[in-house]
């Protein structure tokens, strides 16, 4: 039987994603041509979690993201 661990990630703002105010401002400049910089930031952070083996289960609006990975 598989065992899983679960994680809830708050992506409601850049600080909750681990970015400082200065890093957020730098990100906005770097991705100024993106349709929405916060979406780009969330995608980057979700890809990092995916590389660590986390799988998306569901999301609650645009802020809480539920993930799991096998132990």
Image: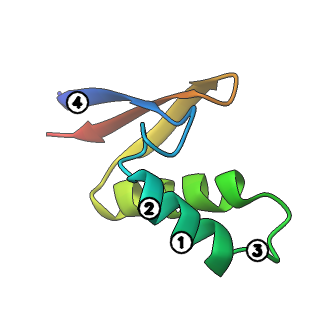
Distance Cα–Cα, label 1 vs label 2 = 6 Å
Residue beneath disc 3: 32
Query: Residue 20 appears at what percent x and percent y?
Result: 38, 53
Q: Secondary structure at mark 2?
A: helix
Residue beneath disc 2: 22
Q: Quadrant of residue 41?
A: bottom right
Where residue 26 is drawn, which disc sits there? Answer: 1
Query: Residue 17 appears at what percent x and percent y?
Result: 42, 45
- Mark toward the viewer: 3 or 4: 3
Query: Residue 31 appears at what percent x and percent y?
Result: 69, 75
Query: Residue 15 appears at what percent x and percent y?
Result: 43, 41
Is there CB contact under 8 Å for labels 3 and 4? no
Q: Secondary structure at mark 1?
A: helix
Residue beneath disc 4: 4
Q: Which of the two labelled residues, at mark 2 and mark 3, occupies the earlier sequence position? A: 2
Q: Which of the two labelled residues, at mark 4 and mark 2, occupies the earlier sequence position? A: 4
Q: How many residues crowd around disc 3 within 10 Å: few (fewer than 14), some, or many (20 or more)?
A: few
Distance Cα–Cα, label 1 vs label 4 = 36 Å
Residue 25 against residue 61 in the figure, above or below: below
């Amino acid at each position: 039987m598989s065992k899983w661990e679960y994680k809830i990630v708050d992506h409601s703002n850049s600080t909750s994603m681990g970015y400082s105010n200065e890093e957020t401002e730098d990100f906005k400049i770097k991705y100024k041509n993106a349709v929405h910089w916060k979406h780009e930031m969330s995608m980057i952070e979700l890809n990092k979690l995916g590389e660590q083996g986390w799988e998306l289960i569901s999301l609650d609006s645009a802020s809480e993201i539920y993930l799991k990975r096998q132990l």
